Image (cartoon, coloured by chain):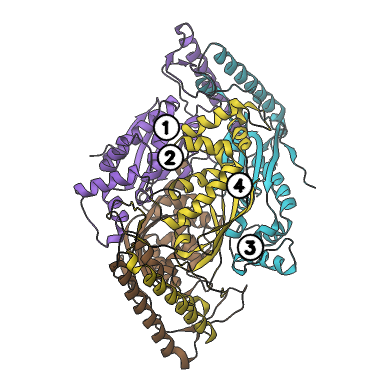
Chain colours: A purple, B brown, C cyan, D yellow
């Protein structure tokens, strides 16, 4: 059975709001040519799915649907929204004043790798600074929240009040996507090249995907996670 | 209850293979900002849907899914596949030799309007020619089928044998689409500017859409069918 | 002649980095059917462009290209990146520490309209608060910049250091888009419904578009700026 | 210098109608972060392009533009139009009666491979049948053309007259596309899995691409032609 809601980071979540997806739809859409529809996947169908993944026949993986409800920091959402072959609706701070919450990292990490390498290892930050830095972050977030609320109270337009809010603030959005685009998202974001924070979300998305479309997921993983 | 399969033209059909769509998803995705989800649509929600349609806020209509299985002549399919914000898988005649069938129009119509006007009325074709022309078409289709099958039998590659097949031949495809793109399709294809044959399909698609998302459909129709 | 760079807001800009677009390409792509190409637009071509706009034949407006280089606050960039039918590359603060700059509004405005109305008039904010609020903003931005730079200096990964930065910070990006998608952008963003700040950019984009494709722009404006 | 027009198949062509593309745009859009623009590509820039290709950073390859004018058989155009991330305008036979021409294969090939394998070798067709089959094709095309013209002459609507036309008939279209989508097209269509006829076009497209963006093309070819 599928677990539909996971907590991610300190105050975020992913909720699988709904889906209409299975491995059978891949087989039926790839075989529209043969005028027959199946209701369960046999060994020959598994081979077909493998074949489609390996040979980058991507369209049969588009005839399905996942809708997620996500709470994530703005800097994570900004990376997420770059995935154009999907649909987004986000909470707007132009009309609505949310009760602001912020991502405060549990542990801190230091810069590794050089510009252009785009690879970062999670190496511990100098322990001398860790608690001091977390404390500075936390104070800054508290102050930002108070400043934002003060502006709203004085009647400043919400769309202007929000400009003082740091990108660690949590936002919420709906995300609808098909399996082909989902595999591409996971390939890029559950990767050592991705920022740790979005990767935490991508790991959960991958878990959900594997539960809903296990045969497709297995073929894709065996193909080095290259999306078709 | 929704009627899931309709015959269209002389030998075609549309089958609603599956869907995951309702009016509520529009409300919930538009109101992600307010952190509350509804399970039925009230009067204020109806106003919201109307507002979104009239003001071209299109994204809340993307968080849903329709999958159709369609049998249509090639010349209709060619117009259909121009709708890029959706997913298609078509029967391929590169690997498969279908039992060819052809669209033979019941009545014939004549050219009205001048190039650039792009408007055609369905005016009856000279009755003197009607039966003769239908008969010529029918013979041509029969001959094309025989020629195609002859080529396949002699061992000619299917992908080459097919090049003699006229665009009246029926093909089959899966089409997956969200409500926003669906409304755009219907606006353009259930229109007096559209060719009669694709319009017959668009009329059925509209019926199905109205049944699944009645409040959205009503708001869109009241807005002169302009897709948001 | 086209002015290629405009300052926008207090520290931003739009630069037309390059383009390959004219009104003739609309005519030639719409008339591919007639096997003739024109090199200048005559009266009948103008009528064709008007006809295409009014009847929502959008594809002939896609055979052209604009590439912009933009500097804008993050909260503006976030709205901009919602326009999926276009291409973006943004400065990344994962690998690079920019010299942070912030948008400080010259004048402040108050909230007008109720949630759901999505219409805001620019009404002056209580003058009692104006200078105090601008001063609080400015101090907050200065502190954010210092905090960010302090974190980078202590060796905290840039991708983590950035999370304290407010959404008023300027970012830079490249944006490539065709005229059809551009008209849609301007319709939505040079509008009384749009936030004042992105509208300032959209006004400039519209000026540039009018200079490059004057006949298309005129037909589109006469059609109430509805994108085809 | 770039050769802008090539004949393809017996009566088709590809004409590079215009482009706005170079390797430099890749470097500048990938490095928007460093606030400097280059006007020629040095060794370090070449390494960056290689890096982007190998690591599937695709967006920097989208800030450019190619517009082609193509004449190809309908069955080739149908495969081409499946590439959704690009723009098409095709000659319409609803309003226009072209002087029909047909693709008649010089040599014929036989079916190799089994359904599901999707691989075909070009093996000569039984020479006993070759001339007979080509002759049957040719006669069928001639008859189709005459039948079509007869229908138009009797006043049958062009959009109905055309339904007797075989998919070997040549059509014309404009195609606009960026380098990222172009590489994806070539990967799939200049491939042993593709039908011979569309491959002939893809080979020409690849030649043109290599001339316009040689460094990008080289990096992509060295990466086994996998589009980023």
Disc 3, disc 1: CB below 8 Å? Answer: no
Q: Is residue A91 above or below residue D13?
A: above
Residue where numbered disc 1 is placed: A189
What chain does badge 4 belong to?
D
Name the one closer to the observer, C105 or B146.
Answer: B146
List x then y, in percent, for residue A175: 42, 42
Name the one closer to the observer, B222 or A113.
Answer: A113
Residue where numbered disc 3 is placed: C53
Name the one closer to the observer, A170 or B169.
Answer: B169
Mark in front: 1 vs 2: 1
Residue where numbered disc 2 is placed: B35
Give a yes or no on whether discs 3 and 1 share a subunit: no
Numbered tag placed on residue C21 in the rendering: none
Quarter of image, res D82: bottom left
Cα separation, mark 4 vs mark 2, equals 42 Å
Numbered tag placed on residue D65 in the rendering: 4
What chain does badge 2 belong to?
B
Number of marks: 4
Q: Is residue D113 above or below residue B69?
A: above
Q: Decide if residue C166 is on the left or right side of residue D189.
A: right
Mark in front: 1 vs 4: 4
* Residue at position x 66%, y 25% in the image: C101
Mark 1, other Cα within 10 Å: few <14 / some 14–19 / many ≥20? many
Mark in front: 3 vs 4: 4
Mark in front: 3 vs 2: 3
Cα separation, mark 3 vs mark 4, equals 23 Å
Mark 4, other Cα within 10 Å: few <14 / some 14–19 / many ≥20? many
Cα separation, mark 1 vs mark 4, equals 28 Å
Q: Is residue C133 above or below residue C37?
A: above
């Amino acid at each position: 059975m599928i677990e539909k809601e996971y907590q991610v980071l300190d105050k975020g979540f992913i909720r699988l709001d709904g889906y209409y997806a299975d491995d059978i739809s891949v087989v039926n859409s790839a075989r529209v040519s043969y005028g027959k529809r199946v209701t369960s996947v046999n060994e020959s169908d598994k081979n077909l799915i493998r074949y489609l993944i390996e040979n980058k026949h991507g369209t049969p993986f588009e005839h399905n649907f996942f809708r997620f409800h996500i709470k994530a920091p703005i800097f994570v959402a900004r990376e997420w929204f770059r995935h154009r072959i999907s649909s987004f609706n986000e909470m707007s701070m132009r009309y609505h004043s949310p009760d602001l919450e912020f991502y405060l990292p549990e542990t801190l990490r230091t810069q590794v790798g050089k510009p252009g390498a785009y690879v970062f290892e999670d190496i511990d930050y100098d322990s001398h600074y860790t608690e001091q830095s977390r404390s500075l972050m936390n104070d800054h977030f508290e102050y930002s929240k108070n400043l934002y609320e003060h502006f709203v109270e004085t009647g400043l337009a919400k769309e202007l009040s929000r400009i003082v809010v740091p990108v660690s603030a949590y936002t919420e959005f709906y995300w609808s996507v098909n399996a082909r685009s989902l595999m591409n998202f996971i390939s890029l974001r559950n990767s050592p090249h991705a920022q740790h924070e979005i990767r935490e979300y991508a790991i959960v998305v991958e878990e959900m995907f594997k539960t809903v479309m296990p045969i497709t997921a297995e073929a894709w993983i065996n193909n080095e996670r290259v999306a078709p």
